[in-house]
Structures are given as C-alpha cells and as structure tokens.
C-alpha cells in the first residue's frame, strides 16, 4: 500500500537549469526588433533599472533613459528622505559589513519629504526622458497623487510579495482599480511568482507585472521567509496568466522578469520564458554612473524589524553604455547585454520579442559545465 501524500510538489526551474534550442533559420542581429511597449510608451531597450538607491538616482535615470531603457526611482528611498543623499550613500558604502544593515535601518527611518519627490521627478522630466517612480502598497494612496502632480509618467507599485487581495485591519485597503483610474497613466505592479496571483493582478487593469520573489543578488527573502519560485518557472507562469487575461479581455499585459539576472544568458532565457522586458539591479550597480559606489542593496534591507537582504559588494566595473551595448572583452556574459539578446534572438529565429517567446527550451542542468573543465574556476559576479 503506497504511503499517503500530504501535498503534491512540481519540478521548477531556474536560469542555470534550462537552455534554449537554436531555431531552423538565423537572423542578422541588426534586423531584430527588441522594442518594449508599456501602454502607449515605447522603449528601444527592454530593460528596467531596479528601484534601488544603489542603482538609480535622478542622474542615472536620465542617462539610462537616453540609452533607451527605463530607470525606476525609489520614491520612498534616500533620494526622497535627504536633501543630500550622496553623503548618506557614502556612509553606507564605507560602513563595516557588520554595521551596514543597522545603519540603513537608521537612515531609512527618517520621514519622506514630499517636496523632494516632486524635485527628483522634475529633474528627470527636465532632461526629456520618461520618468518612473516606485512606491510600496502601504504608501500608494499618499504618495501616488504627489508623483502624478509632479509629472511622473509610469507608476510602479512594488513590494516583496504583492497580491490583488490583502487582509488587514484597514477598513478599505489599496484598491488597484481605483488607483489606476485616479492616475490615468501606465501602472506596473509586483512582485509575484504564481499564475493565480499574476492573473488576479492583471484583472485589476494594470499594464505591467513584475515577476520574481527573492532571486536578487542582495535579497535574502528566500532565506528569511522561505518563499519564492525559480525565475524560469515564475516567468512562464506569469506568461500563462498574460495569455489567459488576453483571451478574456483583449488587453496585453507586459510581463517583466525582475531579479536574479547576472549574465546575457540569463537575460535571453527570461525572454524565451515569456518576458516582455527584464528588471535588473546588481549588473547595473556595477556601472561607473551608479550611485552605490560599488555596493548594492535592495528595498527590503532597511526594514525596521525584519530586513530581508544584505549589502553586497559588486565593485565598479565599467561605464553603463558598455554594460548594455559593449564593446567588451569580458567573456563571462556580464557586459553587452543587448548584444547578447540580439544575437540569441537571431540564433533562435526570433525577429521580435513576442517571437522569442516561442523559442524551444529544454531542461539541461549541466549545460553550463558540460566540457568546461578549464573554466571551472571562472567567477561571475
């Protein structure tokens, strides 16, 4: 008699456990369209810079926007708590590892200044690039109207785990459909990692969804809370929800893989798994233009009672343009991410991102080490 089962588990997959199968024809990389569309806004570079203080400040957002991508400014971060956040960031970067988290908890306990929200947005808008700002669900009602009045183009509502239905003591919680109507601009929400949660969020009328719980280089959510789904499976589940919702409503919601992407290969696999764009942090934190001075930390690190991340040293490697577009002599896939994407799409017979979704994927956990004995000691940051 077989042993009774309490619950069923399914196999899930991360970046290092799958590979892409080349297509039957190849396409020249310069003939490939990688445009990402959100609402009525088009981006030549389908990459979002994470809303982290070590990655995005107004200056970085401007430079990233001029390179065709979308940098998301954390409207609840150091940029909106301090008139001179550069001094605070330098203190965080110089702090001993043992003191970094407690120091951030202190710095992030200062109140958000509404005038700074408008000021940071104004600076980005004056440069002529699209401005996106990130808020947490708890502060959306208060801060979203301020951002709208300041001229923000895209609102990102983001937390470690976001659902369309939340139980709390509040009589009326955050109603996403009401926020969407009030803002009258594209809204991205996240993060989630399941089909059902993604579908529920899409049904509120949002324009984009962030997929990924705990995969980031500086995130410890999976260690602290024990929750998360590997990114390939999470992205595929989000893409399945997008298809269901499109069949229901005729509206196409962008799926954005957020977190865990280190190399061009990871980025390409995200698109093959169903992503329309990706959001990355640590690869961009290594740019000379990044504000973190070679260090990287996420939005959950300064939580006053249960931080879910750690400050990591990523180093300052190279200019932002080189990370995105090359040229590069680095062979580990950490630079020229867009060149890698175009080449991979050409090899996989994909003329645009939606065709890349059709790329055949296989389970191949040994794909990165097969025959690579002499590369065994190569380190990827």
Image (tube, helix red, strand yellow):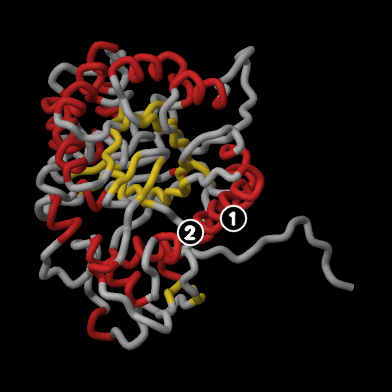
Return the residue at label 2.
274
Q: Residue at x 72, y 60 (%)?
A: 8
State the image coordinates of residue 111 (x, y, percent, origin top left). 31, 13
106 in relation to 286, above or below: above
**Residue matched to label 1:** 240
Calculate the distance from the C-alpha at mark 2 to the C-alpha at mark 1.
8 Å
Q: Are marks 2 and 1 in contact (CB under 8 Å)?
A: yes
Question: Which of the 4 image quadrants contains residue 113?
Answer: top left
**Residue for point 51% across, 38% down:** 161
Q: Nearer the viewer, residue 36 or 138?
A: 36
**Can see residue 212?**
no
Q: Is residue 60 above or below residue 137?
A: below
Q: Is residue 180 left or right of residue 169?
A: left
Q: Residues within 10 Å of mark 1 (few under 14, many from 20)?
A: some
Q: State which tag comes first along the sequence, 2 or 1.
A: 1
The numbered mark at residue 297 is none
Query: Residue, x 34% and y 61% (percent of image)?
Result: 267
Along the viewing direction, whichever of 201 and 285 lies nearer the viewer? 201
Q: Position of residue 80 (x, y in %)?
A: 25, 20
Q: Quadrant of residue 310?
A: top left
Q: Furthest residue to the bottom?
A: 371
In-image side of 175 versus 329 (left or right): right
């Amino acid at each position: 008699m077989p042993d009774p089962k309490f619950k069923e588990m399914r196999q899930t997959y991360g970046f290092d456990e799958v590979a892409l199968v080349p297509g039957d024809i190849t396409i020249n990389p310069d003939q490939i369209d990688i445009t990402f569309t959100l609402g009525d806004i088009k981006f030549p570079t389908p990459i979002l810079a994470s809303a982290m203080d070590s990655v995005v400040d107004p200056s970085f957002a401007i430079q990233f926007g001029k390179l065709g991508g979308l940098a998301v400014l954390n409207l609840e971060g150091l940029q909106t708590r301090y008139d001179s956040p550069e001094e605070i960031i330098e203190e965080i970067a110089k702090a001993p590892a043992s003191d970094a988290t407690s120091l951030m908890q202190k710095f992030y306990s200062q109140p958000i200044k509404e005038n700074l929200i408008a000021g940071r947005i104004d600076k980005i808008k004056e440069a002529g690039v699209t401005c996106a700002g990130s808020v947490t669900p708890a502060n959306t009602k208060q801060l979203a109207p301020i951002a709208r009045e300041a001229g923000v183009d895209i609102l990102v509502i983001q937390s470690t785990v976001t659902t369309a239905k939340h139980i709390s003591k509040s009589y009326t919680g955050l109603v996403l459909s009401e926020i969407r109507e009030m803002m009258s601009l594209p809204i991205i929400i996240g993060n989630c990692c399941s089909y059902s949660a993604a579908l529920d969020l899409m049904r509120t009328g949002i324009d984009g969804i962030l997929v990924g719980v705990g995969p980031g280089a500086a995130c410890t959510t999976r260690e602290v809370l024990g929750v998360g789904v590997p990114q390939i499976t999470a992205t595929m589940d989000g893409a399945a929800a997008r298809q269901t919702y499109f069949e229901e409503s005729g509206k196409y919601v962008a799926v954005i893989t957020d977190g865990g992407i280190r190399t061009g290969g990871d980025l390409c696999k995200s698109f093959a798994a169903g992503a329309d764009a990706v959001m990355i942090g640590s690869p961009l934190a290594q740019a000379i233009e990044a504000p973190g001075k070679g260090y990287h930390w996420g939005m959950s690190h300064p939580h006053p009672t249960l931080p879910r991340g750690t400050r990591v040293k990523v180093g300052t490697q190279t200019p932002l343009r080189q990370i995105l577009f090359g040229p590069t002599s680095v062979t580990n896939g950490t630079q020229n991410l867009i060149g890698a994407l175009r080449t991979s799409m050409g090899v996989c017979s994909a003329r645009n991102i939606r065709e890349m979704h059709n790329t055949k994927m296989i389970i191949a956990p040994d794909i990165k080490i097969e025959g690579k004995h002499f590369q065994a000691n190569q380190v990827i940051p």
